[in-house]
Amino acid sequence: MAKIQAIRGMNDILPTESPTWQYVEHCFQRVAHRYGYREIRFPVVEQTQLFKRSIGEVTDIVEKEMYSFDDRNGDNLSLRPEGTAGCVRAAEQHGLLYNQQQRLWYHGPMFRHERPQKGRYRQFHQFGIEAFGMPGPDIDAEVILLSANFWQELGIADSVTLELNNIGSAADRRAFGVTLAEFLRAHSDRLDEDSRRRLDSNPLRILDSKVPATRELLADAPVLADFINAESVEHYTALKQLLQGCDIGFVENPRLVRGLDYYNNAVFEWTTSALGAQGTVCAGGRYDTLVEQLGGRSTPGVGFAMGEERLVLLLEELALLPDEARGGVDIYLAAVGDELTGQALAVAETLRQELPGLKLLVNCGGGKYNSQMKKAFNSGARAAIVLELEHGESAPVTAVRLRTLDDAGDSENIALEDLPGRLREKFEFLT
Ligand code: ATP
Ligand code: MG
């Protein structure tokens, strides 16, 4: 029978790879907690309407990329393509937003039906930050500082660049859209088909186009900056000052618009040149009208989402994975002879209790000394503990052999009661 394969663009993360992912996830969690953000978890499936109303009907995500289906009740549901909409829905539903300040983070799989390629998948993972109830530029600066702190933690701060733009209010963008559409209509022969279709429905989205001919034409188009309201300009100027005051470098990119409709005022992206076309590792901004758009009371918000796959690729590309992302075990415990199986399990349990940081693999299935040592080497452990009866001795043993699994292969005999202490002495990672 033919074997069933995974769905294209949906990746398995194998045991050899998962330590890298856990490392990145631990780092993010540590950084988020360092800034007082708390985790929120919400479902992978929501009403399709939630995403249409938040992300916007005329966006790549809603038009082309969502996994939507009717469930058995006839409700139209979608796999979440991003986290902000579900986060707002959950926070609003449980009364976390009105008249309150919230600092939240989330992590999990997102789903978009895109053309799979390096750094772009159909199931991918995002870390996200959302801060509610704070209208000023200080919180914008904080979420950007948090992301910068995360780059420091991962060691990639020198490989990413912060891009900033002010996209003003919805009214500013409408006024700009009219002027932009006029300009583009006059050159519609140079526009790609998608962009031509968007001339009437959502001309700003054209700024986000990745088609080279369209990008060329856009270089001469009117700019959004000339249409932004005074209050928004003031907010944006203050944000830039706060970032400068904290030594966060940035470049302003007037063409940065974001592919989701709910953003306003300050928006940003962190990009890298080390990943080819999929160079954006983090994207976010303010979304002061989103809560209201989803039926709640007006609540300011700001946040970002970052793609975990692209971060893992970047760490591999830059060879920045530390030892802790190596995974594997510390010590392999072998027992030669069936009569020692029970004692081996008991010794292992004692060690796990005495040395909670120890990663200990116990040989199962018996085998000769040589075959157990081969398994010990393959496990990646640094040392093996061997239980073996001396000639004429009977079970249980009172001492074991500790053998390092490097080229030296040093070996010593240790009385059972001294074993935890000796391991602690010998391997500094256990203390
Ligand atoms: P892009 O322009 O690359 O399509 P986007 O604007 O659609 O990105 P967002 O919706 O802002 O992306 O998502 C935030 C981050 O999530 C991106 O910067 C990227 O790191 C990651 N991301 C988005 N889509 C994918 C995907 N299909 N596969 C892997 N990572 C993704
Ligand atoms: Mg996209």
Image (spheres, helix red, strand yellow):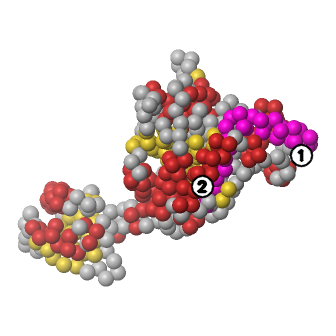
Q: Residue at x 20, y 70 (%)?
A: 424
Q: Tell me the kind of residue under disc 2.
A: Lys
Q: Nearer the viewer, residue 217 or 383?
A: 217
Magenta-colored span? 161-189
**In screen coordinates, is 225 left or right of 188?**
left
Q: What residue do we see at 64% from left, 43% from top?
A: 232
State the SS at label 2. Answer: helix
- Image quadrant holding the C terminus, namely bottom left
Q: Are marks 2 and 1 in contact (CB under 8 Å)?
A: no
Q: Which residue is mark 1?
A: 190
User: Toward the viewer: 365 or 363?
Assistant: 363
Q: How far separated are the C-alphas under marks 2 and 1?
A: 36 Å
Q: Which mark is residue 240?
A: 2
Q: Can you name the residue that lies furthest to the bottom here?
A: 408
Q: Position of residue 396 (x, y in %)?
A: 9, 63
Query: From what the image shows, is residue 19 above or below residue 57?
Result: below
Q: Is residue 385 something one can see in this rendering? A: yes
Instruction: Return the x and y of residue 371 as percentages of the image width and height.
Output: 31, 67
Task: Say which element carries label 1.
Answer: helix
Name the residue type under label 1: Arg
Residue 175 part of the magenta-drawn span: yes
